[in-house]
Image (tube, rainbow, N blue to C red):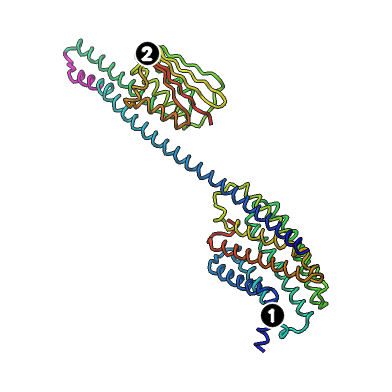
Amino acid sequence: MAESIIIQILDSWSKRYFFDPILLLSEILSLLICLKYYRKTLLHTVFIGCITVYLSGYILIQIVSINTFISSPLHRKIIRLSVNNVIILAEFFTYYFFFKKALTSRLIKKILLLPGALILTTITIIQYFTIINQTTYYDEFSFFVNAFEFFILLATSLRYFFELTKQALNLWPTKSPSFIISSGLLIYISVSLPFMCIGNYFLTVNKNIHLLLSLIHYLSLIILLISISKAFKLKKNLEE
Amino acid sequence: MTILILFITFLTFLMAVYIISTTYYHRKKQISYLENLNIIQAEYDKNLLNTQLEIQEQTFQHISREIHDNISLSLTLAKLQLNTFDWNDRERSGLKLESSISLIGTSIAGLSDISKGLNADIIVQNGLLKAIEDEMERIRQTGLFKAGYTVTGSPVYMDSQRELIIFRIIQEALNNVIKHAGAKEVSLRLDFSSSRLRIRIHDNGRGFDPEQLRGNGHAGLKNMETRAKILNGGMQVSSHHNSGTCLTFTIPIE
């Protein structure tokens, strides 16, 4: 049985050019680095929580992909959808708290609450109906919310870079945790946007393109994880 | 289709990199500028401190010289006369008493002059123009000089630190005229414009060779020049033997 599981995992990984174990390893390493340089602040805790969600969600998806544990394709899809929903929420609120501290514009901070409430409500509704009706009908909605979340984070990180040019601080960009995290986030969002917007469409039309886009998404996620770890290693407040 | 999507993804990636690198270099430039500014500020503060120490040292020397040459001498003479005071010789003692009172009065006036000359509060309280006016009035009261003072343009008020340095420059220049120039007339002109203050001090004294004086390391001239440089300004000396001296200071208004 163990051999069968290993074969299944290896088969699944080889189809995705072994990007999955690389991402898994990156998430574990990133979590370990962040725990090593952990400081008792809200942002440090929130980021560690977010990486934990990434990691546990990813491990869950890997387990679910093995037929031995869950044979029903529907159940597998529902679990994947639920994991995706949790990641959307964790991701958005992590960066919401981050930008709340890093941005200076009070108006932007207040405006950010609106999409936050919208995302939370929509995801809760999607999750509720998915579990109640045992269906993956709401899959597309989840992708739509994910794309929406990315557009909001894109606009917020662009605002951050705009504010950075106006501020008179004397901290070198490479010594600024907020600059490093925002740079990683901007690359992650901009590179993943095509996947978020049209990835779901290609899942049925052209699986190769879907695979390519998801691999690019994973690659940008690794960049984001590296930048978060680098920011933690600076041993400063993350909003600095 | 794959190439198109790859191209779009690459394009968005390039845009992100462009935004990050532009911000990075902008910040780097901004911080380098701030660091340079801090270095210049530190250099300026250092020069200012050095000059303040120099001024302090000169002031002590000036006080010492004044007390030794004038006040101490007058008081010693007064003491000598009072020591030889004879109650029986009323006529001579009366003269001695009058002379002693006069010497003590001169000493008090000397002390008052030193005090007025050193007190920087006048700058804070009354401003540069009033302080210069008082200084010129003191020169006039000696009766030895014809002292002219004119102000043209719209006076600009600077911070008291800058005004004090300008005041000390003028004081030094006027003292040089009194002590060394052998002049009968001295004129001071302040010309204010929107960007600079020009100070011109002219006397009809015996004059000197500026290069020779600089070569000899004349402290007064060097100090005036250093003080003007601290204010990012400059000094020009125009003088010839027996044809007077004209000192011109140009101080930018910040």
Q: Is residue B79 magenta?
A: yes
Separation of disc 2 and disc 1 at Cα?
105 Å
Q: Is residue A190 above or below residue B212?
A: below
Mark 1 crowdedness (10 Å alpha carbons): few <14, some 14-19, many ≥20: few
| Residue annotated with mark 2 | B205
Q: Secondary structure at mark 2?
A: loop
In percent of width and height, residue A113 lies at 72, 59
Residue at figure coordinates x 56%, y 63% from the top left: A232
Is residue A62 rendered magenta in the image?
Answer: no
Q: Position of residue B139 (x, y in %)?
A: 39, 16
Number of numbered discs on residues:
2
Image location (x, y in percent) of residue A156 = 69, 55
Give the main secondary structure of the magenta stretch. helix
Q: Is residue B143 visible?
A: no
| Amino acid type assigned to the residue bearing label 1 in the image | Asp
Q: Nearer the viewer, residue B68 or B216?
A: B216
| Residue that carries the numbered disc 1 in the rendered image | A11
Q: Amino acid at mark 2?
A: Gly
Q: Which residues are magenta?
A: B75-88
Say above or below: B172 vs A199: above
Left of B175 or right of it: where is A233? Answer: right
Badge 2 crowding class, 10 Å Cα cut-off, few under 14, some 14 to 19, many 20 or more, is many
Q: Is residue A133 left or right of residue A79?
A: right
Q: Position of residue A46 (x, y in %)?
A: 63, 66
Q: Nearer the viewer, residue B7 or A158?
A: B7
